[in-house]
Amino acid sequence: MGQGLQVLGKYRFNIFHDFPAQKNFNIDHIAVGPQGVFAIETKGRAKFKKTENDNWKLEFDGEKLLFPGWVETKPVDQAFRQAKWLQKWIENSTGDKHYVTPVLAIPGWFINQTKSSELRVSNGKNFDFLSKGNAILTEKQIGTISFQIEKMCRNVEPKAYKKKETTNSNK
């Protein structure tokens, strides 16, 4: 997924991975560019070994993911929840309010969206669709938001190799 998102760089997007949102969750990917801020949740789902009767297709009805043989709503809820959390975090970090669009990536599936939704669902093959539409963020806004996200993504303290001190008993 990370490599697939890199294509957005040519559209002036900054891409971040594994954003540590809180102690109990992270956001898989964040894309910040002229068309806005996108919180991207990735879910892998196995397909049947034998391909028949379109069992490689899933339908998104705006609320539920309708796989061949089962239905899921938790990934949809999670994507919305994380986007909303990120939106509040950006407002607290920058002082500016920006809408965060939820995106759900389900690699390897053919996705048929039958009803409109704020949630964008993708099979992860082509994220160019995030760059379509009017620009709503300025370069300065992109920079400010990206700076704050970058600080959080790089919050691991470096640990330098510390050589044990030796005492010289001959002194």
Image (spheres, rainbow, N blue to C red):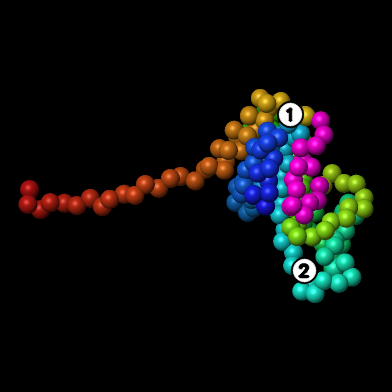
The quadrant holding residue 59 is bottom right
On the image, the x and y values in percent for residue 89 come to: 67, 38
Q: Residue at x 61, y 38 (%)?
A: 149
Q: Is residue 44 above or below residue 1?
A: below
Where is mark 2, residue-wise? 47
Where is mark 1, residue-wise? 137
Furthest toward the left, the residue is 170
Is residue 27 shown to the viewer in this render? no
Q: Residue at x 88, y 67 (%)?
A: 54
Compute the Cα span from label 2 to label 1.
Answer: 38 Å
Range of residues picked out in magenta: 120-134
- In this view of the protein, which residue sits in the foreground, 1 or 141? 1
SS at badge 2: loop
- In this view of the protein, which residue sits in the foreground, 119 or 35? 35
What's the residue type where badge 1 is placed? Leu
Q: Please tell me whether residue 129 belongs to the stretch shown in magenta.
A: yes
On the image, the x and y values in percent for residue 116 come to: 90, 46
Q: Is residue 69 above or below residue 101?
A: below
Q: Please tell me whether residue 34 belongs to the stretch shown in magenta.
A: no
Identify the mark nearer the N-term, 2 or 1: 2
On the image, the x and y values in percent for residue 136 come to: 77, 29
Q: Residue at x 74, y 52 (%)?
A: 125
- In this view of the protein, which residue sits in the foreground, 94 or 111? 111
Q: Residue at x 49, y 46 (%)?
A: 156
Neighbour class for label 1 at 10 Å: few (<14), some, many (≥20)?
some
What's the residue type where badge 2 is placed? Lys
